[in-house]
Amino acid sequence: MSGEFSLIDKYFAHKQQNRKDVILAQGDDCAIVAPTAGSHIAISTDTLVAGTHFLADANPAQIAHKALASNISDLVAMGASPAWVSMGISLPEINTAWLERFSNAFFKLADYYGIQLIGGDTTKGPLTITLTVQGTLPEGKALTRHGAQSGDWVYVTGQLGDAKAGLDVILENNISADTSLNQELQRRHFEATPRVLAGIALRDIASAAIDISDGLVADLGHILKRSKVGARLNVAALPTSKELLQFVGSRALAQQYALTSGEEYELCFTVPEANRGQLEVALSNTPFTCIGQLTGTEYIELHNDDAPVDWQLDGFDHFKGNQ
């Protein structure tokens, strides 16, 4: 891309103070970091593509927030503390107004969570953002998907379903007569809050964890598959917002949104009976809800309190959309 290095210098270089564990950041062929002794490094890479994860004319500040928040959420699901990020970005053209808003929002969120941009690349092409995030955690403390056991309890953080409602507004699949409601749901779609403190607090409490990026049914299914267990969920316990209920108009539909909404970036985690009493203190600053219990069936049973629910639901597939 013409002007690539001046673009990097203007919008992405020297925007943050170096973390103490960053020896060399941008400006050379590689960054150099120095993790503390006794730490493991968690690494995740994710790509957001215009037309798949966001519309090309979406607010660049919201795109930046979504890109970084979704990647931080992957670290959170493993119990890692965010540390470093590299970014590859392709742009159809240099748009200074777009880049200014994007970079400002990116560094605002990065600084809030103490994560430093240490390198990356820019090129000309379809609007695409690829981030590689890295975080640290004590040896042997990683949360995984394969530690759950039958009898463990299933929890989620926050509220579910708003991201799908926001996507409906963006795609004009469903729009409320209340303009402020539409705007709020659209904001919630883009501006997830990674549950960093919760992920760290759950290291010694949860038996398994995952972040909700493809929908609760799909993502919990990954835990069930890896752990070889099943789950019985109470849809009446699903945490949904009053805004979602107002938007969809029925509690049953709000519950279906909660089960299938992708890109929520809340945590779904399982806890053994012996550890349940620790949650109130450990997650004192994070809303969380028990929604069911693991079983030995290796599939998900849905119930409304004690009444069976026969909903055929899938999660979110980036190539198909919500099912």
Image: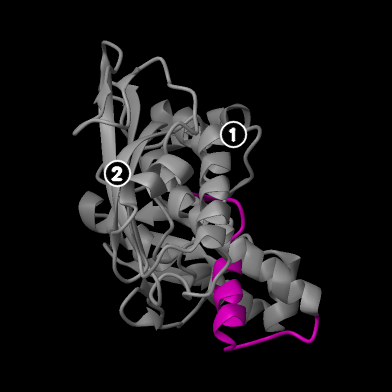
**Quadrant assignment, res 133:** top left
Give the percent coordinates (x, y) of residue 25. Answer: 32, 27
State the residue in front, 258 or 68: 68
Of 134 and 106, the residue lying toward us:
106
User: Which residue is rendered at x = 40% and y = 77% of the image?
Assistant: 51
- The disc at residue 266 is none
Dot 2: element: strand
Look at 38% across and 53% down and name the residue there: 294
Q: Which residue is mark 2?
A: 120
Looking at the picture, does residue 205 appear above or below residue 226? above
Q: CA distance from mark 1 to mark 2?
A: 35 Å
162 within the magenta span? yes
- Residue 14 vertical placement versus 259 (above, below): above
Q: Residue 34's x, y, as percent?
A: 27, 17
Pick whichever of labels 1 and 2 is earlier in the sequence.
2
Q: Which percent across, then down, holds residue 103? A: 51, 48
Query: Can you see residue 38?
Result: yes
**Left or right of 176, for residue 200:** left
Asked whether, in this view, residue 233 is left or right of residue 144, the answer is right
Along the line of sight, which residue is nearer the eye, 136 or 114? Answer: 114
Q: What residue would you read off at disc 1?
A: 283
* Number of disc labels: 2
Identify residue type, mark 1: Leu
| Circle 2 residues within 10 Å: few <14, some 14–19, many ≥20 | many
Cβ atoms under marks 1 and 2 closer than 8 Å: no
Toward the top, the furthest residue is 37
- In which image quadrant can residue 136 be found? top left
- Looking at numbered disc 2 in the image, what kind of residue is underneath it? Gly
Q: Is residue 72 magenta?
A: no
Q: Quick one: SS at disc 1?
A: loop
Residue at 49% over, 29% down: 16
Per the rendered image, the range of residues in magenta is 153-178
